[in-house]
Amino acid sequence: MYISALLFGISANIDTLVLGFSYGIKKQHIPLATNLIISLITFFGTLLSIGVGLKLAGFLSPEFSRIAGSMLLILLGLYYCGKYLWERLYILKKGDSPGAISLSMQSESCLSQKESFALGITLTVNNAGMGIGASFAGIHFLLTSVTTFFLSALFLIAGNRLGTRFSPPFIKRSGDLLSGLIIIALGAYELLA
């Protein structure tokens, strides 16, 4: 029972680790309160998806949930790529030098609560199919949800710190673009897996 919950929590939160890293490379810090919002949304989403999995199975297939979550990740990635390109075009139109561009990308920011809510919903939708599948497998819903909560918080912090500390300057200057590409790749992988 414990091993099943742990394995589910790890597999459900690989996305969280990658997303934390992608925010870290663009120097976007995820504060503890924001991390807790994301983790709580993931917790309740996992609890809900496992708890009502058998009832929803006739209407909402795990395949649909996986596709919907993957598409949300891809759209989030496209947003960051578009934001990067838009900012580059704006800066180049103003005639700033490349040095000014690199300096403008150096400042650290924090993930807002609005963004954290959207990210938590995206991760929850992405994991809903796993939750429904877990309910079929008879995995204990409360233990699994609590495990998912703690691993979500841990993986988000670890990924964010890795991205912030171990990315070279050229990656930090292109943070939005690389973050977007990583999230798109993650969504595509989930879609094709």
Image (cartoon, rainbow, N blue to C red):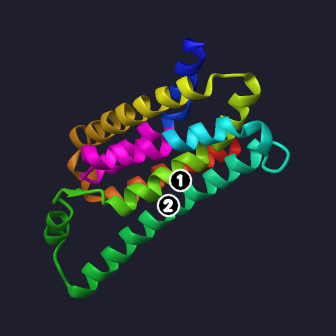
In which quadrant will I find the N terminus? top right
Residue at far right of view? 58
The prevailing secondary structure element of the residues shown in magenta is: helix
From the viewer's perspective, is residue 53 above or below residue 25?
Answer: above
**For residue 182, side relative to residue 58 (left or right):** left
Magenta range is 15-42
The residue closer to the viewer here, 29 or 101, is 29
Residue drawn at x 29%, y 54% as measured from the top left: 26
Separation of disc 1 and disc 2 at Cα? 9 Å
- Residue 80 position in % (x across, y down): 42, 64
SS type, badge 2 = helix
Choose top left, top right, bottom left or bottom right for residue 178.
bottom left
Q: Is residue 151 magenta?
A: no
- Residue 144 position in % (x across, y down): 55, 26
In which quadrant will I find the C terminus? top right
Query: Which mark, by number, is residue 122?
Result: 1
The residue that label 2 is drawn on is 76
The residue closer to the viewer here, 100 or 175, is 175
Q: Amino acid at mark 1?
A: Thr
Q: Amino acid at mark 2?
A: Leu
Residue at far bottom of view? 94
Q: Is residue 33 magenta?
A: yes
- Residue 46 position in % (x across, y down): 57, 38
Residue drawn at x 28%, y 47% as measured from the top left: 33
* Label 2, residues with CA under 10 Å away: few <14, some 14-19, many ≥20: many
Choose top left, top right, bottom left or bottom right for residue 103.
bottom left
Which label sits in the foreground, 1 or 2?
A: 1
Disc nearer the start of the sequence (1/2): 2
**For residue 20, side relative to residue 141 (left or right):** left
- Residue 153 position in % (x across, y down): 37, 36
